[in-house]
Image (cartoon, rainbow, N blue to C red):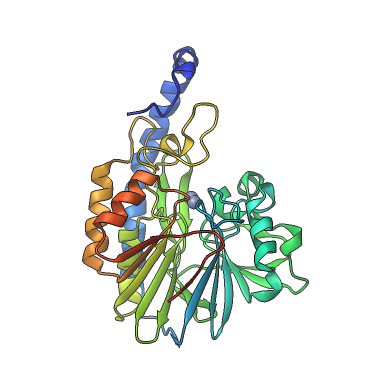
């Protein structure tokens, strides 16, 4: 197994250990306590959720603006930006690394996309690869490249408190219909060891003759928890599941300076633990039990090994999403 942290960093770790070790132990105590609270919080939210009136859509279409894998001529990046369209309107879900990297602007220009074309922006969760870059995450300010902005003030649906300049922000506190006939699961929480308490909202839509389509951003609350919430919102069968499921098992995206960041700080677990194949096996079993007909995987937070395993072991027809591609449900 290859190193998550290159041996060139090990002497630095040894020297810094008198500071790092007590810090990690204190953080771990907080993390353990918060994880228990978060599990209860999600359970209560799921228990209290009521069935949602979701319009039956004639069609739902997804065009991928930002993803790790990309069609020829498009730029791949470790972020997410998905454009959803139905006969009732359209919505942009996440803005990748926003103006801080070229993928969103380049791919949007190639597709002739800007925010004039959508009714609203929805942010899955407040992480840099979804809300517009590292400065955006630090300042809790959703950031969209100027080239994409619309003169008209659009709604920006947020799963947690943040700002979004040029938008009318709307905090989503429970499952609700957003726009274009697409609903939010409402915020579902996760305690991540390094990144801390994180709220994430998934999208849910109901397509005529098919069933429910569910999309996540990073999938931090776990797809198991998201699907439990979805079950409360509608009795329709599950048709498709897509988006980030967060399995950087053997590798991470955006490795730098001999550090596989996603496998150390992006696992949600303490850095001395890993996301394992056993974890993935449990999720594969859960998805198979939920029985979607189609699965659309994101490579932005899931390594090739995990993508391969899911393509082989999921019973659903499984595809890996690509920037520049359009999928119709
Ligand atoms: Zn992500
Ligand atoms: Zn995330």
Q: Is residue 50 visible?
A: no
In the rendering, at what x and y percent does residue 94 appear? 57, 61
Q: Is residue 36 visible?
A: yes
In the rendering, at what x and y percent does residue 56 appear? 42, 87
Of residues 325 and 120, the one drawn nearer to the viewer in this rendering = 325
Q: Determine the residue positioned at 30% across, 71% down.
A: 293
Quadrant of image for the C terminus: bottom left
The answer to whether 291 is drawn above or below residue 255 in the figure is below
Q: Determine the residue positioned at 27% across, 62% down.
A: 287
In the rendering, at what x and y percent does residue 163 appear? 66, 58
State the residue lying farthest toward the front.
Answer: 72
Of residues 185 and 162, the one drawn nearer to the viewer in this rendering = 185
Of residues 222 and 325, the one drawn nearer to the viewer in this rendering = 325
Of residues 68 and 160, the one drawn nearer to the viewer in this rendering = 68
State the residue lying farthest toward the right.
Answer: 151
Q: Taking 135 as reference, is 57 left or right?
A: left
Q: Determine the residue positioned at 61% across, 68% down.
A: 121
The answer to whether 248 is drawn above or below residue 295 in the figure is above
The answer to whether 67 is drawn above or below residue 260 in the figure is below
Q: In the rendered image, which quarter is residue 115 located in?
A: bottom right
Q: How many marks?
A: 0
């Amino acid at each position: 197994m290859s190193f998550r942290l290159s041996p060139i960093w090990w002497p630095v770790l040894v020297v810094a250990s008198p500071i790092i070790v007590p810090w990690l132990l204190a953080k771990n105590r907080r993390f353990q306590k918060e994880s228990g609270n978060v599990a209860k919080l999600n359970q209560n939210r799921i228990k209290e959720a009521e069935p949602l009136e979701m319009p039956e859509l004639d069609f739902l279409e997804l065009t991928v603006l930002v993803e790790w894998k990309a069609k020829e001529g498009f730029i791949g990046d470790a972020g997410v930006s998905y454009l959803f369209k139905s006969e009732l309107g359209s919505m942009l879900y996440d803005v990748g690394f926003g103006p801080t990297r070229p993928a969103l602007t380049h791919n949007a220009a190639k597709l002739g996309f800007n925010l004039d074309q959508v009714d609203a922006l929805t942010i899955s969760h407040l992480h840099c690869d979804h809300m517009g870059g590292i400065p955006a995450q630090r300042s809790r300010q959703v950031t969209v490249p100027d080239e994409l902005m619309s003169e008209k003030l659009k709604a920006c649906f947020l799963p947690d408190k943040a700002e979004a300049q040029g938008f009318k922000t709307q905090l989503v506190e429970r499952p609700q219909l957003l726009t274009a006939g697409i609903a939010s699961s409402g915020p579902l929480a996760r305690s991540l060891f390094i990144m801390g308490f994180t709220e994430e909202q998934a999208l849910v839509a109901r397509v005529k003759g098919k069933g429910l389509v569910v999309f996540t951003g990073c999938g931090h609350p776990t797809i198991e928890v998201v699907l439990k919430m979805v079950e409360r919102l509608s009795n329709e069968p599950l048709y498709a599941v897509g988006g980030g499921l967060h399995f950087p098992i053997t590798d991470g995206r955006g490795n730098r300076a001999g550090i596989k960041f996603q496998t150390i700080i992006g696992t949600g677990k303490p850095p001395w633990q890993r996301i394992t194949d056993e974890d993935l096996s449990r999720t594969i079993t859960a998805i198979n039990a939920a029985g979607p007909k189609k699965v659309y995987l994101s490579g932005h937070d899931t390594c090739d090994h995990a993508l391969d395993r899911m393509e082989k072991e999921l019973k659903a027809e499984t595809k890996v999403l690509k920037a520049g591609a359009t999928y119709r449900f």
